[in-house]
Amino acid sequence: MISRVVITGLGIVSPIGIGVSEFWKAALAGRSGITAIQSLDSFPMAGYRSKVAGQIHNFSPEQYLPAIQGGRVDRYAQFALVATKEALADADLFMAKESPHRVGVIVGAGMGGMVMGEREITQLFKSQKPHRVHPNFIPTITLNSASGIVAMAHGAKGPNLTISTACSSSAHALGLALQCIRSGQADVVITVGADASITPLVFAGFCSLRALSSEFNDAPERASRPFDRRRDGFVMGEGAGALIVESLAHAKKRKARIYAELGGYAATSEAYHMVIPQEDGEEICTTMMLGLKAADIAPGQVDYINAHATSTTIGDAVEAKAIRRFFKNRADKIAVNATKSLVGHTLGAAGAIGAVASTLAIHTGQIHPTANYDDPDPACRLGGISRSVQERKIRTALLNAFGFGSNNATVVLKKFVT
């Protein structure tokens, strides 16, 4: 018999709030966290096509973390530490009572320590003094720095992994946490998605790719508009989401509060294009089908989809087409929303932040609005997208996440029933 896996703790650092309570209140209000970028590390914005992002303002790691943790790691790892700290407290999980080798850490990250990486390489070329490169440069910029520091901060000695598949990274991290527990490698997995890449070089790269919105530089809160006719690209965001995932047996033993159940997961590759999805939506259909099959759930049982929905012209249309193609006559009856409409595209953190929103939707019966859905694009029209809060009894939810490199993930979440 396949062991059941549940979610018992949540933590978040986002442009609309640090902490689950603040995040969820803002999300249900449909409040946008997109603001104008004044400068990028003192780099002027004049040469950038896009000038808006989902930034976390006035973030002080010392407000949330011991100096020994927060002061020696990159911004993305600071976000991961803060989100993890909240999730562990939310779950009432005390590591001193756990067998450390039975607690794993799996982090999804798209870019890694880009803040320090760009700063150090710039200083090196300016100074021409290689001996002045920061001694912690290498361990700080490596993609597994967040998973390492999270494990060290909490004494988690089980499997320690970092998944980097661009925008689907932390959705895969959640899926692998499910598999890790079902295979018996761990009882608990601290699952995190984190990214902080609103930096001069990364932002310039996305601008050069013509991937970012540039039509709403004077109205930042309107820039991220999934499924809307006027969408013109995604809005970069930053942040972290953390979920405590554990076996049902372990959760029951310690009498934990259960938010939702992790039912299944699927990972596929379109093997098509580095940045553009296959336009017929067939592979997205396949991913959703395989995820539901892994969870032993019929398509007719799906009530809600937290869509990948980045606000790009092609991506949103293809995802909507895939939902229609897969769910057929039920497509308009399924509630669909886009968390990125509120926080922007947080890259490697997107799946985890979407999973937090999905878990809260299942737990509370409230689905947050999709912001800026003012003029529905006929190519993306789905009856379940709303600018208002939707009250639903959710049995099954899908979390979709798609990344550069033709990478697809679907995670199936369920209402927990004893």
Image: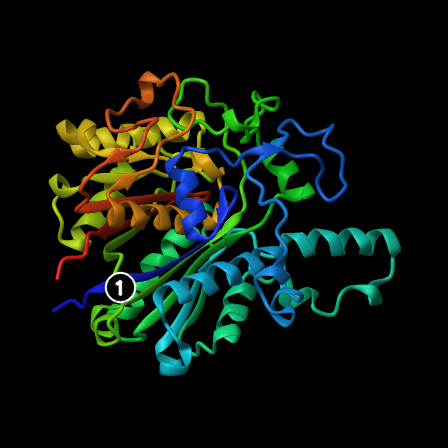
Tell me, yes or no, if residue 168 can be seen here: no
- Check the picture and name the quadrant holding the N terminus: bottom left
Q: Whole-percent x and y of residue 412?
A: 24, 50
Q: Is residue 183 above or below residue 415?
A: below
Name the residue nearer the viewer: 360 or 114. 360
- The three-letter code of the residue at mark 1 reads Arg
Residue 362 horizontal side relative to residue 202, left or right: left
Question: Which residue shows up at 13% across the image and 53% down it?
Answer: 296
Q: Is residue 402 above or below residue 9?
A: above
Q: Quadrant of residue 136?
A: bottom right
Q: Quadrant of residue 159?
A: bottom left
**Residue 388 image point, x, y percent:** 32, 28
Note whether 3 is above or below 314 in the view shown.
below
For residue 110, above or below residue 70: above
Report which residue position mark 1 lands on: 257
Q: Is 317 in front, or is 274?
A: 317
Question: Which residue does the image show at 26% across and 44% down from the upper left?
Answer: 398
Q: Is residue 411 left or right of residue 113?
A: left
Q: Residue at x 36, y 82 (%)?
A: 97
Q: How is the image coloured?
A: rainbow
Side (left or right) of 28 relative to 138 = left
- Label 1 crowd bin: few (<14), some (14–19), many (20+), radius 10 Å: some
Q: Residue at x 39, y 72 (%)?
A: 104
Q: Secondary structure at mark 1?
A: loop
| x and y, in percent, of residue 57 in the image | 61, 44
Q: What x and y, as percent, mark residue 50?
A: 62, 29
